[in-house]
Amino acid sequence: MKKLSLLLALAAIVTAILPSCAGGKEAAATTTAETAAESETSEIDARMAISDELPERDFGGREFRIYSSPGRETTFYAEEQNGEVINDAIFNAIATTEERFGVDVVNIESGGDDVGHNDKIRTAITAGDDAFEIAENHDSLSGGLAVQGLLLNLYDIPHLNYTKPWWPSHAVESLTYRDKMFLASSNFSYRGFHWTRVIYFNKDLLVDYNMEEPYGYVFDGTWTLDRFISLVKDTYEDLNGNSTRDDDDLFGYVAKGPIYCYLEQYRLNPVIKTEDGGLELGVNNERTLTLVEKMYSLLHESAGGLIRDFEGAEKIFGSKRALFAFGYISDAVDKYRYTDVNYGIVMQPKLDEAQDSYYAEYTDRFLLFPITSQDTDFSGMIFEAMSAEGYKQIFPAYYEIALKQKFTYDDESVQVLDIINDVRVIDFSYVYIPDINGMLNTLFYGTPSRDFASLYARNEKSLNAKLKQITTSYEKLEERLGT
């Protein structure tokens, strides 16, 4: 087991926060640094003070086995410390859980790619093997295992407390259907936050174009799609002077294709859960038509809008040739910190000011509890404890330290990220019927068109058939389980 006291773990986090100060710096600078450090330390203390309300137990060195595909464990498991802040926070969080409950957290690699790993999970469960306590898995593949009846209902597992802040409340609501939820997305891993959709902007280019940073709009609730489009649609420069609109020019906005997981951030409910337990398509309405019209016009008819594949979009923004860019929070850590772009971060805008809130869509690698589980009291307790420690130790390392302190440059980005974390959601339809989100990818990226009505008409029958498959699967599960 990994032995490291919680005191040392917290000391490492606080030390990483403190900025280094060269001799001779002014007292005011020192005071500012101390104040910032005290603020961060207070926030960590506040997190640590939230009880997980778990009973005290000693499992005598029992293994808590996590089944994962190669390389996918890096957001929740670390075998040893290596001096890297996030890795060591993961190690420390696991050590805290191990020492508290007398367990040995182990990761078992399946040796398969995403599809192969999913198949191995299915094979182990259908064979009745008690091979692991939980398995991590690709999000949309996990939905298939759920409707096949191979996963436990999370509401039946002891100790999982969805009122705690390590469970994103909007995601819990979205993934729940007929009082059942089979897919766990918590702070057990930081990947869900890592893959949250945001918009980056180049602060220096905004100055050059005499534009205000969008933070004020965000905070007063007026960060809408119309507002965003007005900033970017006419912003274009032919930098290479060839009189051709190409990737070497400067654009107002560059989006990443393929586009998916894109609807619910505009408060469009792709699938409506009815009061009688049914499912209905919820995208064929005026709000969707409005979104399609505005985004198609921006990306394919305006001078300032552009859509490219992931690498192309990242290259354009990273080379300071776009004022705004669609991206993931992970881009701050994995991409833009290696550039000299002076960037800020905001969430995707509202469709209009009438929208009740901002929402931030994300994707994740779900954690699954197999029906072969021999002791859900054990697996639920350790999973909840590790989710809590993820919130208390891993999340501060990723969010409070690495992202806020190291890779972003302004207090407003910090405030925006706090809002984003509170409104993250992963949509039910993305997991179980990704074809719905796929329609927007077709219209904006695959075969560009604003004709949503025709595309919907071609797909409506098959989409309804898939909804029927899901409701039928749930009905069979309920019949078999007597619920």
Image (cartoon, rainbow, N blue to C red):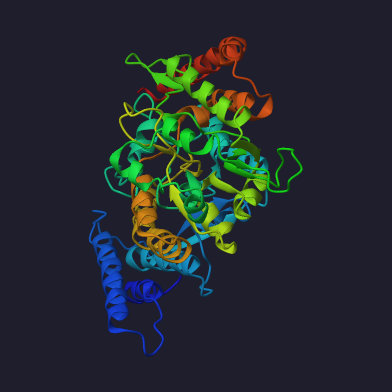
**Residue placed most toward the observer, 118 or 63:** 118
Residue 295: % across, % down:
54, 28
Which residue is at the front of the view, 456 or 363?
A: 456
Q: Up-down: is 197 above or below 338?
A: above
Q: Is residue 32 left or right of residue 319?
A: left
Query: Which picture quadrant has residue 127?
Result: top right
Residue 90 in picture, x, y percent from top left: 45, 64
Q: Residue furthest right?
A: 242
Image location (x, y in percent) of residue 193: 45, 49
In this view of the protein, can residue 388 be seen by the observer? yes
Q: Residue 256 versus residue 16: which sits nearer the camera?
A: 256
- Residue at left offset 60%, top offset 54%: 320
* Residue 69 image position (x, y, % from top left): 61, 50
Q: Residue at x 64, y 25 (%)?
A: 442
Q: Nearer the viewer, residue 105 or 75?
A: 75
Does the rendering let one see residue 422?
no
Residue at image point 58% right, 53% down: 72
